[in-house]
Amino acid sequence: MNWTTPADLQAQLQRRWDRGDLLRASVAPTIAWPLRLNLTAPTAADLAARFDDVRRWAAALTAVPHVRLDWREWLHRVQGRQRLPEAAFIDTLDAALALVGKRRAADVYQGLWQQTAATLPALLPWLTKRPLQAIELAPHWQRLSAVVAWVQAHPRPGVYLRQVDVPGVDSKFIEAHRGVLAEWLDLALLPAAIDATATGVAQFARRYGFLDKPVRIRFRVLDPALPSLPGCHELPDITLDAASFAALALPVSRVFMTENETNFLAFPPREAAIVVFGAGYGWDALARAAWLARCQLHYWGDIDTHGFAILDSLRGHFPHVSSCLMDEDTLMAHRLHWSKETEPVRHDLARLTADEAALYDALRDDRFQARLRLEQERIGQRWIVEHLAT
């Protein structure tokens, strides 16, 4: 039996709610009322063969509140003339909202619309596009709107986020809502106030002219013969902002990069070399250091799919970087230290060498072990020293 049930009628309206249609209709005439719902009714054969079931079906539909039914008369050979629902309608938006239990939410949305139309009309297209998200943001709406109004009044302000002078707003609030604020600011600001080359939440500050927190780059000098900074002796552990690191003029020919702090600290001395600690997938700061292009670069990451994905990403900035201790011999020599990745990478990586790609494919295809991972800190120190010596 595929006759339309009361739950089916409600589900049709729920889908319109989930798409935001009913909320849009609360502020603009986007739906023609009355709204006809899909209704699959019994056939004449059903009436003859399942009379009692048909009567119960009709009674159940009749009991649905806020739904208006059109009826059709049937002539039953035993029971005589009968009336059955033929079509179902929702006559008003209020009835539709009542059926899905969303009257209060619609009131919230209408309030946000009226408030925004009066104060920040440039955001109305966003409200039309994302009505459900607007309701979720309702508790924060006043503060979010105040941030947008402040940036409108101070385009490309050249201050840190914590210096935005809005009551009840701090930098953590802005950072937590960068995604929606970016969408709003793109609508509310003049094009000249937006750096279109800065995209994504990570570049929120640069896109809208805020000062960004300086990125710190930590490195160790591996050659005691290299010139050192004042006050630094032997093999110093140094942290510089990205601009200062980019301006370095160290006479080094090799740069090693590792993701593990212990490996960074224990990295053996090497002639004319430094080791850089942990950048993960964020290589933009290192890419500013043009002098790295003349160095031999070696990346040492975990032997797992993410390690090779990071290597692939790094080659987007430095195509000449080579992998270090990320080979099958190292993997097989440390079987006792194998572990598992939580969420392996599965997509193709175009910048790997043939040997790297072969090992990556073996890892993502689970040829050695499901979700295999060898963390870099598990590799023996003797193995490291011997490998670097070659």
Image: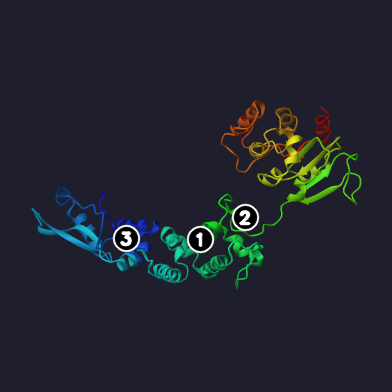
Q: Earlier in the sequence, mark 1 or mark 3?
A: 3
**Which residue carries the number 1 mark?**
184
**Which residue carries the number 3 mark?**
30
State left or right for residue 243 relative to residue 56.
right
Q: Are marks 2 and 1 in contact (CB under 8 Å)?
A: no
State left or right for residue 359 relative to residue 292.
left
Q: Which mark is residue 206?
A: 2
Q: Earlier in the sequence, mark 2 or mark 1?
A: 1
Q: Are marks 1 and 3 in contact (CB under 8 Å)?
A: no
Is 59 or 71 nearer to us in this picture? 71
Q: Does 27 sit above or below residue 57?
A: below
> Which residue type does callout 1 highlight?
Trp
Is 72 or 227 nearer to us in this picture? 227
> Which residue type does callout 2 highlight?
Arg
> Splitting the image into 4 quarters, where does residue 299 fall?
top right
Q: Does 151 sit above or below residue 366?
A: below
Q: Position of residue 179 (x, y in %)?
A: 55, 57
Q: CA distance from mark 1 to mark 3?
A: 23 Å
Q: Position of residue 154 (x, y in %)?
A: 59, 66
Residue at 71% in and 30% down: 327
